[in-house]
Amino acid sequence: MATDFKSIPIIDISPLVAKCDDPKRVQDPDVLEVVGQLDQACREAGFFYVKGHGIPDSLIKDVKNVTRKFFDLPYEEKLKIKLSAAAGYRGYQRIGENITKGIPDMHEAIDCYREVTPGMYGALGKIIEGVNQWPHDPPYFKVLMEEYISFCTDLSRKIMRGIALALGGSADEFEGERAGDAFWVLRVIGYPGVSNTNGQNAPENDIGCGAHTDYGLMTLVNQDDGITALQCLMWLRL
């Protein structure tokens, strides 16, 4: 991977989003332009912004607002959906419970996974069997998140179709028997700051999340506006 890029690429993927399922997409010059940009971004940077993604701005705003309201709740209220093995390790993760390279992270989160029925993935999948835990407060948390998840999983499919074309394969290369039964993870993360842990014991480490490589094929990141702490590789601001 090249390391001499100076900024994170911004790609308008609206042509791909609009014509992703069109049988004639590979003949469309606008779609091919997006495919070329995805190819270059993945090879040279490994990160890229997308616009024209099709997720309503109003939904993104509502998801952020309801998330803030949840993390502002008293600690005892958040513990009502505490992450547990019985729920397939879904639910609220307290500050310091997430460990990166042996060091507790200074953040709290709600972990949501694709819901897994008993036996769905055989014996190896038993540990993640369960349904997501949703708070009753704030109201509409579950409704908003499930709508958001639906948009994100569809967007991921469309981006992966573009990447498949960039690799010289068919658009559905990552679908069907090869990788069509996608497993998704949604982490809603709050970084309270060292002086605002809302009654929780803060870890000695004051880093929100240590350096790491995400599991999975692709990660979509939706961070707060104006945040410049998230950086990658050569300390480029994201």
Image (cartoon, rainbow, N blue to C red):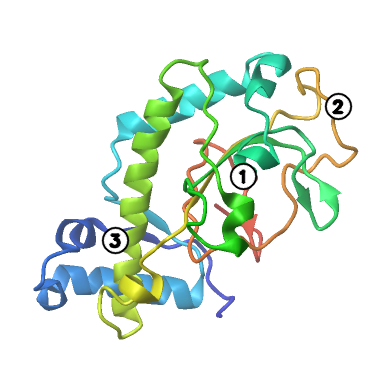
Q: Percent position (x, y) of residue 133?
A: 55, 31
Image quadrant containing the N terminus: bottom right
Disc 2 element: loop
Q: Quadrant of residue 181?
A: bottom left
Which one is earlier in the sequence, the residue at label 2 or at label 3?
3
Which residue has dot 2 on it? 201
Dot 3 surroundings within 10 Å: few (below 14), some, or many (20 or more)? many
Residue at 55% x, 23% y is: 68
**Kind of residue indicated by mark 1:** Gly
Q: Is residue 144 left or right of residue 129?
A: left
**Kind of residue indicated by mark 2:** Asn
Which one is earlier in the sequence, the residue at label 1 or at label 3?
1
Residue at 22% x, 55% y is: 14
Residue at 36% x, 70% y is: 38
Q: Quadrant of residue 23?
A: bottom left
Residue 215 visible within the image: no
Mark 3 and mark 1 in contact (Cβ < 8 Å)?
Answer: no
Question: 221 or 233, which lies in front?
Answer: 221
Mark 1 and mark 2 in contact (Cβ < 8 Å)?
Answer: no
Name the mark nearer the viewer: 1 or 3: 1
Extreme residue toward the right, this view: 204
Disc 1 element: loop
**Kind of residue indicated by mark 3:** Lys
Question: 234 or 223, which lies in front?
Answer: 223
Residue at 54% x, 52% y is: 238
Which residue has dot 1 on it? 88
Dot 1 surroundings within 10 Å: few (below 14), some, or many (20 or more)? many
Residue 158: give its label. Answer: 3
Name the mark nearer the viewer: 2 or 1: 1
Disc 3 element: helix
Dot 2 surroundings within 10 Å: few (below 14), some, or many (20 or more)? few
